[in-house]
Structure formats: C-alpha cells, structure tokens
Image (spheres, helix red, strand yellow):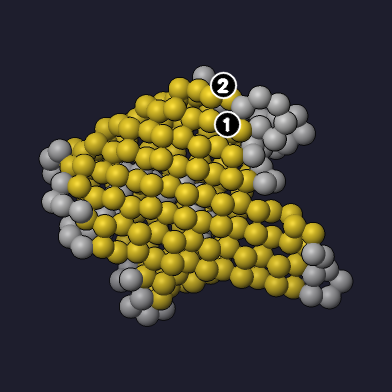
C-alpha cells in the first residue's frame, strides 16, 4: 500500500513479459470523531529484453479527522535494471516524494549503481545494491538543499507458504547534508489467484529536519492488493 520507495533493484522482475499490482486501503469512523484514511499504490514491472527490466511505482496517502486533513503524501519511482550476468547487474532510479505534513516539502533524486543478486528461487529472492546520485531536499521555508549522495538498497522476499509472503525493502541514502533511511515491511496473504490481503509497515527517517518537525514518520496500512 503506502510503499514509499519501491526498491530500484527490481528483484521481482519477471524473466519475460510484465506483471504488476494495484493496492487499496480505506478506513472510516464516525461518532464523537469522524476520521477517514485512504491509501493506494500501483506497481508495474516489465522485461524489455533478456538483460533489461524496467518498472515504476506510484503511491498516495490521505488522512483526515473531522474534515481537517492530517496527512497527505505522494511518491513516484522509476526503476531500471540491466543484467550483466546471472547475479550481477546495473541499476538506476529516479524518485520523488511529496509529503505535505513531513519534514520536507519534497525530496527528489536520481541514482545509478551496481547490484548483486544473492539468490532468487521459488522460496524468494535477495538483492543488494550500492549507487551514487544527486538529490534535492526542498524545505517548506528557506533555501532548498542540493547534494551528492551515496545510496544502498536491499530487496528481500520470502515465500512463507503457498498463500503467504513476507517482503522487506530497505534504502539508506547518505548525503552531504541529510541522511535518509526508509524501511517497508509487508505481509501478503492470498485470497484468490489475483487478490490478496496486505499489511505493511513503513518507516522514513531523516537525520536533519527543519525546526518543529519530527525526524521519523511511520505508517501502518491494511488493505487489498490486486495482482495482474
């Protein structure tokens, strides 16, 4: 659901063809307090040629209490992978995060690097990557920060059973001004061949933030995921 930064490693890219999933979650309460929470995401990966895969991810989150908006966040990532051998590959990522209630107005970056597939079989996959890039941290007030960065990625999936899977994506971005750490843990349980229940926990941490804002944001989401 609210997958802030899908891994640029594309460890789940198909050997041929395309695949994707559409996630949706909604919660509403009424009475003494009226609340609504809406989140969703779209993830698509395609194999362009034998060595080259490409994918993109779009997510959104919107929360409101008594008609007052308390959270609004949108993310986009465009990921590319070029296999050099069975286990070695190059990868590139362009990403953008717009969080109206976060530490920064938006953060955007472009990265390119080297990845290593530790394993990929019927039980799951594990890939690691290291990249260099450039990022903008746009402040709500004051001057934007523009910096060179080093980025590391981890993309892990484990098939618990025929109907359940655990995934873990980690990203660490080390900048001249700000370090950012992002973790998404998710558990999916199949309801049918194409429909699954998904529970996800997302943590985003910035080492330096403007005065009056928190360094760490976390989101727990529950919803359904449609695969195609």
Q: Which mark is residue 137?
A: 1
**Tag 1 and tag 2, C-beta contact below 8 Å:** yes
In the rendered view, tell whether residue 30 sits above or below residue 41: below
Is residue 150 or residue 111 the one in the foreground? Answer: 111
Q: Is 96 on the left or on the right of 13, as rendered?
A: right
Q: Which quadrant: the C terminus?
A: bottom left
Asked which secondary structure carries label 1, the reply is strand
In the rendered view, tell whether residue 186 sits above or below residue 171: below
Asked which secondary structure carries label 2, the reply is loop
In the rendered view, tell whether residue 70 sits above or below residue 146: below
**Where in the figure is residue 197, as x and y percent of width and height?**
47, 71
**Residue sitting at 30 percent across and 31 percent down?**
113
**Where in the figure is residue 33, as x and y percent of width and height?**
83, 68
Query: Which residue lies most toward the right here?
Result: 32
Is residue 48 or residue 213 the one in the foreground? Answer: 48
Q: Which mark is residue 177?
A: 2
**Residue sitting at 36 percent across and 70 percent down?**
227
């Amino acid at each position: 659901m609210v997958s802030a930064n899908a891994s640029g490693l594309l460890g789940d890219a198909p050997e041929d063809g395309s695949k994707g999933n559409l996630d949706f979650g909604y919660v509403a309460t009424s009475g003494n307090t009226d609340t609504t929470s809406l989140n969703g995401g779209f993830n698509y990966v395609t194999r362009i040629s034998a060595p080259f895969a490409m994918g993109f991810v779009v997510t959104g989150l919107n929360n409101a209490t008594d008609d007052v908006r308390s959270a609004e966040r949108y993310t986009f990532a465009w990921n590319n992978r070029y296999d050099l051998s069975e286990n070695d590959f190059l990868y590139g990522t362009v990403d953008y995060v717009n969080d109206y209630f976060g530490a920064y107005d938006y953060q955007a970056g472009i990265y390119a690097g080297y990845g290593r597939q530790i394993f990929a079989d019927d039980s799951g996959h594990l890939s690691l990557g290291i990249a260099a890039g450039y990022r903008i941290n746009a402040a709500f007030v004051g001057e934007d920060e523009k910096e060179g960065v080093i980025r590391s990625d981890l993309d892990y999936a484990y098939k618990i059973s025929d109907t359940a899977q655990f995934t873990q994506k980690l990203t660490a971005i080390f900048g001249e001004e700000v370090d950012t750490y992002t973790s998404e843990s998710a558990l999916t349980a199949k309801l049918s061949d194409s429909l699954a229940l998904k529970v996800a926990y997302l943590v985003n941490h910035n080492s330096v933030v403007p005065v009056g804002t928190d360094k760490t944001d976390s989101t727990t989401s529950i919803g359904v995921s449609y695969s195609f």
